[in-house]
Image (spheres, helix red, strand yellow):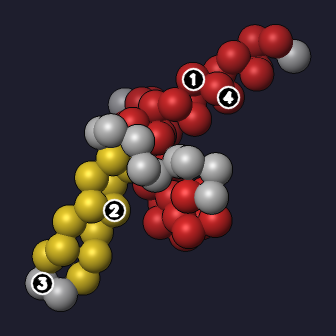
């Protein structure tokens, strides 16, 4: 259940700050999905979310 909440939070962050995060290469990794449904673009950054959660986990353990 906790991973689902974390994934949902990352999806919300990526949808809000997607263009800014793409400057750093996030959002263009293999495993990130872009769909066009009913005239709307849907972005599902699965690989970028996993990468960011691993980085935050490593940073949390280091501190």
N-term-proximal mark, 4 vs 3:
3
N-term-proximal mark, 2 vs 4:
2
Q: Residue at x 46, y 31 (%)?
A: 50
Residue 43: numbered disc: 2
Residue with the most extreme top position? 62
Crowding around mark 1 (Cα neighbors within 10 Å: few <14, some 14 to 19, many 20+) is few
Q: CA distance from mark 2 to mark 3?
A: 14 Å
Q: Residue at x 28, y 69 (%)?
A: 42
Residue 18 vertical placement versus 40 (above, below): above
Residue 16 locus on image (x, y percent): 55, 69
Residue with the most extreme right position? 63
Q: Are marks 4 and 1 in contact (CB under 8 Å)?
A: yes
N-term-proximal mark, 2 vs 3:
3
State the SS at label 1.
helix
The residue that mark 1 highlights is: 54
Q: Are marks 3 and 1 in contact (CB under 8 Å)?
A: no
Q: Can see residue 62?
A: yes
State the SS at label 2.
strand
Q: Can see residue 13?
A: no
Q: On the rendered structure, is 60 left or right of 27? A: right
Q: Quadrant of the C terminus?
A: top right
State the SS at label 3.
loop
Residue closer to the observer: 52 or 31:
31
N-term-proximal mark, 2 vs 1:
2
The residue that mark 3 highlights is: 38
Q: CA distance from mark 2 to mark 1?
A: 20 Å
The image quarter containing residue 62 is top right
Front of the two marks 2 and 4: 2
State the SS at label 4.
helix
Q: CA distance from mark 2 to mark 4?
A: 22 Å
Residue 19 locus on image (x, y percent): 56, 68
The residue that mark 4 highlights is: 56
């Amino acid at each position: 259940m906790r991973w689902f909440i974390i994934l949902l939070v990352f999806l919300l962050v990526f949808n809000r700050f997607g263009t800014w995060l793409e400057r750093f290469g996030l959002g263009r990794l293999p495993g990130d999905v872009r769909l066009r449904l009913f005239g709307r673009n849907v972005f599902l950054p699965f690989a970028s979310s996993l990468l960011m959660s691993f980085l935050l986990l490593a940073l949390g353990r280091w501190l």
